[in-house]
Amino acid sequence: MTVKEAIEKTDAIKPNAFDNDTKVGWLNEVEGMVQTQALLFAPEEVIVYGAYSTCKNMELLVQPPHDKLYTAYLAAMIDYANGEYNRYQNTYQMFNAHFGEFMRWFASVYRPADTHPEFYENEYMEVET
């Protein structure tokens, strides 16, 4: 799933007034969680997306079937930013379920502490140092 696809899918199921750059910022938050909690990147190694216009075609790190965590996170952030805190609790709980599912799968298939760069190398991204 690309940055653009994640945003378009979220917008289709949860119409909102937030611009794409705001949503890219939220995708950076969830990608940071993936990178530091699952892939065990050091904070200074975390890959960050730039403006939507330059990153919209970049592939997100988590692949199907676990990529549903992106739309769940975006939906939760939309609810939070809109002050819809009951909805936020529900959508964030869904994100947590999807993220936990990904973490369990990743830990069972890969040995994150040994690192597996072939899993998380992404030709479109650069590590900011």
Image (cartoon, rainbow, N blue to C red):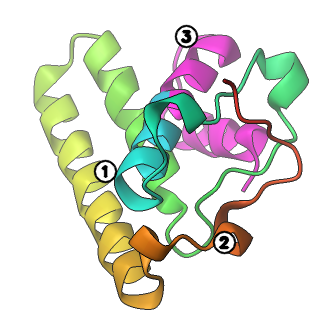
Number of other residues with Cα within 10 Å of mark 1, as a class: few under 14, some 14 to 19, many 20 or more: many
Which of marks 2 and 3 precedes in the sequence? 3
- Please, what is the dominant secondary structure of the magenta stretch? helix
Which of marks 3 and 1 precedes in the sequence? 3
Number of other residues with Cα within 10 Å of mark 3, as a class: few under 14, some 14 to 19, many 20 or more: few
Query: 100 or 34, which is in the foreground?
Result: 34
In this rendering, the answer to whether 15 lies above or below 8 is: above
Q: Amino acid at mark 2?
A: Phe
- Asked if disc 3 and disc 2 are in contact, CB closer than 8 Å, the reply is no
Numbered disc 2: secondary structure: helix
- Asked if disc 1 and disc 3 are in contact, CB closer than 8 Å, the reply is no
- Quadrant for the C terminus, please: top right
Q: Is residue 9 left or right of residue 3?
A: left
Give yes or no for residue 57 being in the magenta stretch.
Answer: no
Separation of disc 2 and disc 1 at Cα? 22 Å
Q: Amino acid at mark 1?
A: Phe
Give the residue pinned by disc 1. 95
Give yes or no for residue 15 being in the magenta stretch.
Answer: yes
Question: What residue is at 47 percent from the left and 59 percent from the top?
Answer: 39
Number of other residues with Cα within 10 Å of mark 2, as a class: few under 14, some 14 to 19, many 20 or more: few
Numbered disc 1: secondary structure: helix
**Quadrant assignment, res 97:** bottom left
Q: Amino acid at mark 3?
A: Ala
Which of marks 1 and 2 precedes in the sequence? 1
Q: From this viewpoint, which residue is outermost toward the bottom?
A: 109
Question: What residue is at 49 percent from the left and 69 percent from the top?
Answer: 66
Separation of disc 1 and disc 3 at Cα? 21 Å
Give the residue pinned by disc 3. 17
Give the residue pinned by disc 2. 119
Query: 38 or 98, which is in the foreground?
Result: 38
The magenta segment: 1-28
Q: Position of residue 20 (x, y in %)?
A: 68, 18
